[in-house]
Each structure stands twice: as C-alpha cells, then as structure tokens.
Image (cartoon, rainbow, N blue to C red):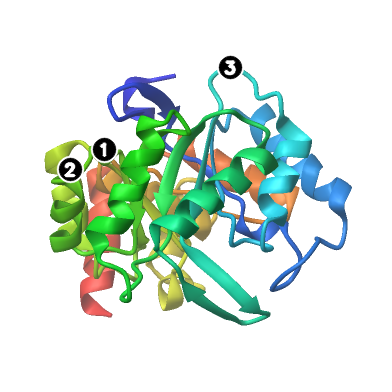
C-alpha cells in the first residue's frame, strides 16, 4: 500500500487512512441489531476489504458494538487495530450523560477489554469532556490505564485546541476524534494542531455533505468525472485535505461499506479539491 495511503498511529501502528466506524452495526438507537449475523458479516467483510482500523465505543448499543466486534473478529488478525471509547453513559434510549470520573473510566475500560476479548486495547479514547470532572483527572485515568498495560495508546474526542494541549501536557496523545467533514469544519484549528504534532485526526460524521451533493452540484460533477459517487468524493476530499486524516465512515450495509472503502483509491486532483473548496466557501 502506498505510503500516502497509510498513517502511523503514535509513530508505531501503521494503518490504512480509511477505517470503519462501528456505531451503526447495533440496533436503531440502542440494543441488538435486527440481524446479528449480518452485522458480523459486515465486520468480516470490512477486514476482507483491507480495513485495518475499526473504531467503536462502549456507548454504542450500549456495549453491543463491542460485543459484535469481539464475536466476529477475535482472535484478531495481525495488523488489525481496534479502537474504543469510554466516558459516556446511556440512561435510556435517546438520553445520556458524560462520566469522565477516573472510577468510571477504569471500570468502563475493564468492560471493554472483556467484550472485545483482548488483554490490551490498541487505542482507548475519552469519548466526551465531562464538565463535572477536572479534565486532568480524566486524562490522568487514561494515563494510569496505559501504565497498567490495559491500553496501548490514548486518544481524545470532542475537544478544542486548549484541551488538546492540556491533554498533551499529561500524556502522549495518539489521536483526536472530532466532528469534521466538507460541510462541518469548525475543528479546522484542531486539525492544524494535529498536523503539526503528527497526531491522527479521526473525523466523525465524515459523510455530511448537505447541498453539495445535490444533482448537478460540485460533488456530483466531480463524481461523474471520476466514475464515482458523491459520497466517495466526500471521503476522497478528506483524504486529500490532510495526511493525518483518518476517516471512519460507518454503515449497516455491506454494499455501502464496499462503496466507502473504494474511496481510498479515488485520487482527487488539486483542481478537483479547489472546486469543492470554492463551493463550500460560496455556500
């Protein structure tokens, strides 16, 4: 695989720059999926297609996404990196709260280890900032988990540049996961900070496209020129945007998975990228 198609997490784990987000393999909102075997087939197919980075969270389901990954893929093939997150607690369907207390994070990590069927989690991420807990305490708990050998690398999510720097002052940060796409770029400054520090940037909700994907719109035009779909152009735009970008599109459909994975071979020219940029600025 070409070097520009890969990224080194923490300078150590080399993975393809197009991963898979496993939130949507669970049921609608919460609980088990409608077809558990189909969800497992989706995960197996992702690995067959060369996906070697899967992102999940104990919150998805809750717990069901991690269980499905463990059931479908453990023992994991060499080179497959499974990342998960802790720090959010579901109260009931549609309602949740953050919990970044050290006690909860350590308990959550133990649960994730069991469900994923591993002794060490490759990348463990703080899901969301808990305003009731000092941030240094939450990050310190993740550092303790790393020191205990429960997690290998640490990531953070839903942060600004100030919190990123605060976290980096406590422990090495391998990744940041924020909302980012063609149509949502409020985290541009965080992405730039990640580029400077060689930190992987995982955009969640990477497929947000809005009116840019309308028939005859800029994504549609570029897609037709490349015999691709607007969704593939949206992902290719992200890959073109930054060498630290690691999109994690999710789906519950094998066909959609295959379409997404094919986007890693779509090379946008600088002219294509500029055309999309101009459309975003004009929107």
Query: Quarter of the image containing the N terminus?
Result: top left
- Whichever of labels 1 and 3 marks the residue nearer the N terminus, that label is 3
Where does residue 141 sit, x and y in percent of width and height? 35, 49
Relative depth, front residue between 259 and 179: 179
Which residue was labeled with disc 2?
195
Do the residues under discs 1 and 2 have CB atoms within 8 angstroms? yes
| Dot in front, 3 or 2 | 3
Determine whether 129 is above or below 140 in the image: below
Q: How far apart are marks 1 and 3 (CA)?
A: 24 Å
Q: Where is residue 97 in the image (x, y as percent from the top left)?
A: 49, 76
Q: Is residue 213 visible?
A: yes
Closest to the camera, between mark 1 and mark 3, is 3
Between label 1 and label 2, give the one nearer the viewer: 2
Q: Which element type, helix, strand or loop, lies under badge 2? A: helix
- Between 78 and 242, the residue placed more toward the observer is 78
Residue for badge 3: 78
* Residue 14 on image: x %, y %: 40, 23
Residue 28 position (above or below residue 87)? below
Answer with mark 3 or mark 2, whichever residue precedes in sequence. Answer: 3
Image quadrant for the C terminus? bottom left
**Around disc 3, counting alpha carbons within 10 Å, would you say few (fewer than 14), some (14 to 19), or many (20 or more)?**
few
Side of 239 where 249 appears, left or right: right
Above or below residue 122? Residue 134 is below
Q: Which mark is residue 243?
A: 1
* Residue 160 numbered mark, or none: none
40 displayed left or right of 198: right
Q: Residues within 10 Å of mark 2 (few under 14, many from 20)?
A: some
């Amino acid at each position: 695989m070409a070097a520009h198609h890969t990224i080194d997490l923490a300078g150590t784990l080399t993975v393809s720059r197009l991963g898979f987000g496993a939130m949507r393999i669970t049921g609608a909102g919460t609980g088990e999926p409608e077809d558990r075997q189909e969800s497992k087939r989706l995960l197996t197919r992702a690995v067959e297609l060369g996906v070697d980075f899967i992102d999940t969270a104990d919150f998805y389901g809750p717990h069901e996404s991690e269980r499905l990954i463990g059931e479908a893929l453990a023992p994991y093939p060499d080179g497959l990196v499974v990342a998960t997150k802790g720090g959010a607690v579901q109260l009931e369907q549609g309602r949740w709260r953050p919990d970044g207390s050290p006690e909860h994070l350590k308990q959550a990590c133990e649960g994730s280890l069991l469900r994923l069927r591993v002794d060490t989690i490759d990348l463990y991420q703080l899901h969301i900032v808990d305003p009731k807990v000092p941030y240094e305490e939450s990050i310190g708990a993740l550092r303790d988990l790393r020191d205990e050998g429960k997690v290998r690398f640490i990531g953070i999510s839903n942060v600004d540049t100030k919190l990123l720097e605060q976290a980096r002052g406590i422990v090495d940060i391998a990744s940041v996961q924020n909302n980012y796409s063609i149509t949502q770029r409020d985290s541009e400054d965080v992405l730039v900070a990640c580029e400077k520090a060689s930190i992987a940037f995982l955009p969640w909700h990477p497929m947000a496209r809005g009116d840019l994907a309308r028939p005859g719109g800029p994504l549609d035009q570029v897609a037709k020129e490349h015999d691709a779909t607007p969704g593939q152009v949206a992902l290719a735009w992200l890959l073109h945007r930054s060498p630290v970008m690691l999109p994690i599109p999710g789906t519950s459909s094998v066909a959609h998975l295959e379409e997404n994975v094919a986007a890693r071979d779509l090379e946008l020219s600088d002219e294509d990228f500029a055309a999309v940029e101009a459309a975003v600025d004009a929107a």
